Image: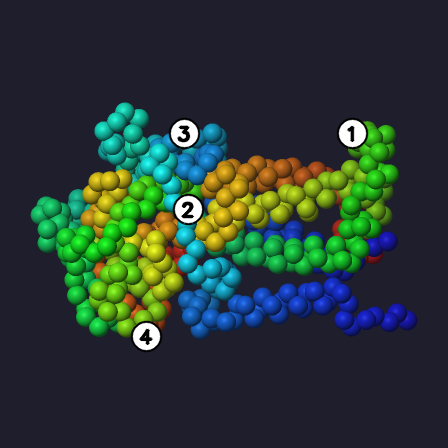
Amino acid sequence: MRHARWVRIAHGIVTASFLTLAVTGVVILMAHPRLYWGEAGNDLTPAILELPISRNYRHGGYEGATSFAQATGSPISANRTYSIFNQNGWGRSLHFIAAWLLVVPGVVYLLAGVFGGHFRSHIWPGSMELAPRHLWRDIANHLRLRIPPATGGPRYSVLQKCVYSFVVFAALPLMGLSGLAMSPALTAAFPPLRLFGGYQSARTIHFFIFIALLLFLMVHVVMVVKSGFRRQMRGMIVGD
Amino acid sequence: MKTTRLITRRNAIVTGLAAAGGFALTRNWHELPPTYGNLLRMGDAVTYAAHRAVLPRQSLVREYTRADITSFPAIGTTNPGKGAQTPLLEAYGRLQRGAFADWRLSVEGLVATPRTFSLAELQQLPSRTQITRHTCEEGWTAIAEWTGVALSHVLDAAGMLPAARFVVSHTYDGWIDSIDLLDALHPQTILAYGMNQRDLPIPHGGPVRLRVERQLGYKSLKFLHRIVIVDKFDDGGKSGNIQNGWAWYTGI
């Protein structure tokens, strides 16, 4: 069994796109490395998480704080004097080119996978495989690093099928949707996007799913290497 | 020897989607901003074309209640009158010292009657108050109540001509940016002179700033000076976003 050509092409496009999205995503986050929840969040409101990933981390440099209203606890305004690190000009534009290259081939891949039988034959775990004893045996094998040699094709263990299914049907679509939920134009046009709980909730969700995908990537690369690097690379690039 | 079908299910799906996408995007090709042969701008142009092709024309952004109003940082130029380095900034400083009594917004270009508006004249036009979310490209957001006059009223008062396609805004601190007519005539696109029930503070763009609610914050120019209605795309040159490395359309 080999990886079909259209699968290899889709995998290549998604890999390049995901890596670009990851790098530009970090660049974008570096401009404002604070995470919030709800609709609003900025340097003058409390954050739920601050990330030490650029010189903007806890940068300070605000002056002239004034209250908008007389009451105590009123929202305030303050002027930023600190010059922030910001590469979002090219960062955002490149992020969205990569997003197009993920979404358009991605939708084609999903449709082709559903209607062409690829998912049913290779990706979706069967009910027999999901039996607790079988599942547990596969987990134990993975923990003991008992890795069968590469087949160079789409013969996946049940754990692999579960994780790939999670990535393809849950994580990546949620990355896309939470990304769209940060768009003023799209949330105006499609109110259901507001189900994420607001711009900052979407942004925070976007970040944490990114972390999950990063962990997936690391494990995926380790497994590819340990199961027979050359055979796996040939199998996914050239197809034999 | 293996025989292969030319029109497989997969080929049909791919071709169909590509055709549909291409058709949708090419409808308004001549109205796209130029890309200057720049790959990044091509991506931005695709996003703009897709939004204009697919999104409803006049969808409104969410409006909030006064309880949702939050603290709001002032960034970029926060005190144009201080240490003024250009003639425009010096002019702003003089106007500021006169409490903006002599401030005028000039409306020029493809209009039947080019004219100016004083602050009082803008405030006499029908006003709109909206509590909306400012979404900065940096990644922070803030909610504030804006009071102002819909840009469409101002364009109407000056008699915008049928050939008009873009509205170009010039600011006292040297920025030039433009929006297309769909955004210019949008009900929530206002010239704001009030913020959180007071006069628009200087750090947030007083006396009058633009609010373009369906795009990111940097389209909502502060310290408005002139508005020029044009029929050809104007990228603002060295003072505009594109030549400074930023997307012109930023609804995403």
Q: Circle 2 sits in a helix, a strand or a loop, which is it?
A: loop
Chain on which label 2 sits = B
- Of all chains, the one bearing label 4 is B
Which of discs 3 and 1 lies nearer the camera? The answer is 3
Residues tagged 4 and 3 counted as in contact (Cβ below 8 A): no
**Residue drawn at the location 28% of the way across and 67% of the way down:** B229
Say which amino acid is labelled 2: Arg
Name of the residue lying farthest toward the front? B126
Task: Please report, as a chain letter, where disc 1 is located.
Answer: A
Real-space Cα distance between discs 3 and 1? 40 Å
Amino acid on which disc 4 is placed: Ala
Q: How crowded is mark 3: few (under 14 residues within 10 Å), some or many (20 or more)?
A: few
Between circles 1 and 4, the one closer to the viewer is 4
The residue where tag 1 is placed is: A143
Q: Which amino acid does label 1 sit on?
A: Leu
Above or below B25: residue B136: above
Comes first in the chain, label 2 or label 4: 2
Res B120 label: none
Left/right of residue B215 with respect to residue A16 in the rendered view: left
Numbered badge on residue B163: 4
Left or right of residue B234, residue A154 in this image: right
Mark 2 highlights which residue?
Answer: B62
Do dots 3 and 2 share one subunit?
no
Give the residue pinned by disc 3: A46
Q: What element carries label 1?
A: helix
Nearer mark to the viewer, of 1 and 2 = 2
- Quarter of the picture containing the C terminus of chain A is bottom right
Residue type at mark 3 is Pro
Q: Quadrant of residue B108?
A: bottom left
